[in-house]
Image: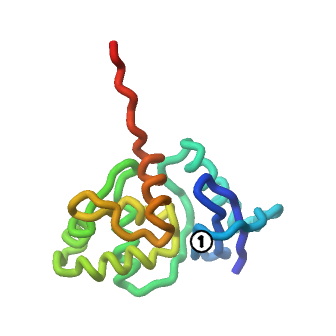
Amino acid sequence: METCIISSPIGFTRISGNADGITAITVLNTKEEVSKDIPETLKSCALQLQDYFSGKRQSFDLKLNPEGTTFQKQVWQALQTIPYGKTVSYLELSKQLGDVKAIRAVASANGKNPLWIVIPCHRVIGTDGSLTGYAGGLHRKQWLLNHENPAKQQSLF
């Protein structure tokens, strides 16, 4: 397994993976040293994340290899269908997966997503529109949602 650390506007980020794909992208709550040399298997991910943060990218084209249960992987696959700049509720996601009663299991799988931003768990909100739970912190979730859907300044004329 290879790893590297990159800097982002909302924290240092650890990328892990190998030739089989990216296994984890994690925002860190500590200051880290940015990797001087990024392993070849992680370069595309690091570049695509930089493009995302600079506003040049809205989707990712990466080979992913997250570890999880079959159900978690189904939830993570469904998360990838949420369009950039849009949100869905945990209830909507449960319905999409075919079981409205699985809302807690869906929320749990969402919280265990190992691929921060690339699998956009930040786009899932409470039914009432509230920002509920986010492993990276609600301040980061709000930042990401604002980044993807900035308020447009209305013209006065």
For image coordinates 37% across by 79% down, the residue present is 109
In the rendered structure, the answer to whether residue 63 lies left or right of residue 128 reads right
Q: Quadrant of the C terminus?
A: top left
Residue, far bottom: 69
Q: Looking at the image, is 91 positioned above or below residue 73?
A: above
Q: Looking at the image, is 59 positioned above or below residue 40?
A: above
**Amino acid, disc 1:** Ile
SS label for mark 1:
strand
Q: Quadrant of the N terminus?
A: bottom right
Residue 36: where, in percent of width, then height? 82, 61
Q: Quadrant of residue 130?
A: bottom left
| Residue neighbourhood size for the residue with mark 1, other residues' Cα within 10 Å, grouped as few (<14), some (14–19), many (≥20) | many
Residue 104: where, in percent of width, then height? 27, 80
Q: Looking at the image, is 17 positioned above or below residue 12?
A: below
In the rendered structure, the answer to whether residue 156 lies left or right of residue 13 reads left
Q: Quadrant of residue 128?
A: bottom left
Q: Looking at the image, is 68 positioned above or below residue 63?
A: below
Residues 43 and 157: in front is 157
For image coordinates 21% across by 69% down, the residue present is 91
Residues 71 and 53: in front is 53
Residues 2 and 36: in front is 36
Residue, far right: 36
Q: Is residue 48 visible?
A: no
Residue 147: where, in percent of width, then height? 47, 47
Residue identified by numbered label 1: 22
Residue 16: where, in percent of width, then height? 65, 74
